[in-house]
Amino acid sequence: MSRFDFIGAFNRWVHPGLLVVLVLLITYGAVFLQTAVRGDASWMRQIQGIVLGLILMAIAWMFDYRKLQDWLMPLFLINIILLISPRLPLIGQPTAAGVYRSIGIAGTGISLQPSEPAKIAMILLLGAIIARYGGSIDNWRTFGKVVGLSLIPFFAVMTQPDLGTALVFIIIMLGMLFVGGAKARHMTALIVGGTALIALVFWANSLTYDTVRPGDHLLIRNYQLTRLTAFLDQGAADPHRAGYDLNQSKIAIGSGGMTGKGLGEGTQSQLDFISERSTDYIFSVLGEETGFVGTTALLGLYLALLVIALAIGSTSSDLYGSLLCAGIVSMWAFQILQNIGMTMGLMPITGIPLPFMSYGLSAIVTNILACGVLFSVWSRRPYLSRTRGGAHEITV
């Protein structure tokens, strides 16, 4: 293969920026997770998840995403199976609190959270549906169909219960509707109506908060309500309950200063003041041990990731590719803002993982697989092929 052929093939299939950012994020996450868990077995499971994610990413990269537009029913069934699988006998794994979020792989001791890959399945399905309207969702009936379909995974995940992940599905829907050509009046009505519904749910729960046991089912469980509202009155929150981890997280981030205390030297994390340091509060570990410099570096990588994903969407040869990129960007952006904001007391406390950083085999596989979808869109864009004979556009 000549030099020109190699360069042409590389430019055709690989987005160098995305590849570099992905490698850096995976490395960054693995290093700080090892610090947070102190090298126990969960770190090796995360490495296994990274390897599995890279394999699935390669498969998605080679697969022509455009073929999925005709797979509406298979994608719908995959989505439903993923969402209901934690409730299925033999494979569903309820916790001691009666929470159904995971399934077990027989004989391995490994559990998976199906709602994570369901995010990708939802993006693929919703993108295929919206793309059929050609970028113009101009009537209430069509808009209602898309919203109604999107609410299925939302309510399914809410019953697990997992409010944080359920909200991710709503954000994905909003991002894809925006790119898909939904009218401003439809979007405004949806946001206003959704906000009013959330306020009603909180009001209904507050009326019975003192009379219903924490384990009983309401629209939102009592412990979820407590976590969501703890950030609103942080001074009054009981430091031994909902506000405890939040207070310790803020202490950890603030004590990191400019350059941090050094890897493995954080007192709040290493002395177990932060209970969920490898999952919900991994950013607190980063802030304490690397300070402003380390957290800024991570935010820079996230910004680069989102900008690159948006750029790939803008170069797509079709609306479906752009919608897939919009869904992935919406998913990542919300999780990043929510998780980091939560650790600093700026956002409600939810169990949303920080992409590529938090411990979780399902989450890391899903995020790396999302990169495979981006690579697939990039690889099938119209592009200029430069050879000794000049340049010409090729559309695959």
Image (spheres, rainbow, N blue to C red):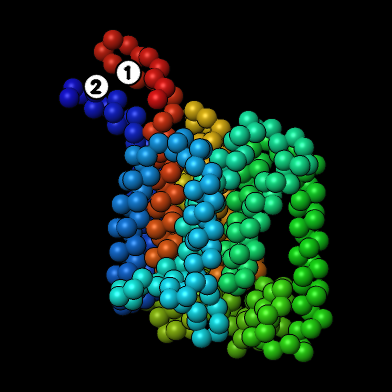
Q: State the residue at coordinates (67%, 46%).
A: 146
* Quarter of the image that includes the C terminus: top left
Numbered-mark total: 2
Residue drawn at point x = 68 percent, y = 80 percent: 217
| SS state under label 1 | strand
| Residue 393 screen position, x and y as percent | 40, 17
Q: Residues within 10 Å of mark 2 (few under 14, many from 20)?
A: few
Looking at marks 1 and 2 on the same chain, the residue that comes earlier in the sequence is marked by 2
Question: Which residue in the structure is indicated by mark 2?
Answer: 4
Q: Residue at x 47, y 75 (%)?
A: 89
Residue 251 circle label: none
148 above or below 46? Answer: above
Q: Residues within 10 Å of mark 1 (few under 14, many from 20)?
A: some
Q: Position of residue 121 (x, y in %)?
A: 50, 51
122 to the left or right of 347: left
| Vertical comparison of 5 with 344: above or below | above
What number is the disc on residue 386? 1
Residue 295 visible in rendering: no
Q: Is residue 210 visible?
A: yes
Q: Quadrant of the N terminus?
A: top left
Where does the image place residue 204, in percent across and percent down from the top left?
80, 75
The secondary structure type at the circle numbered 2 is helix
Residues marked 1 and 2 touching at CB (< 8 Å): yes
Tell me which amino acid carries mark 2. Phe
Q: Nearer the viewer, residue 295 or 200?
A: 200
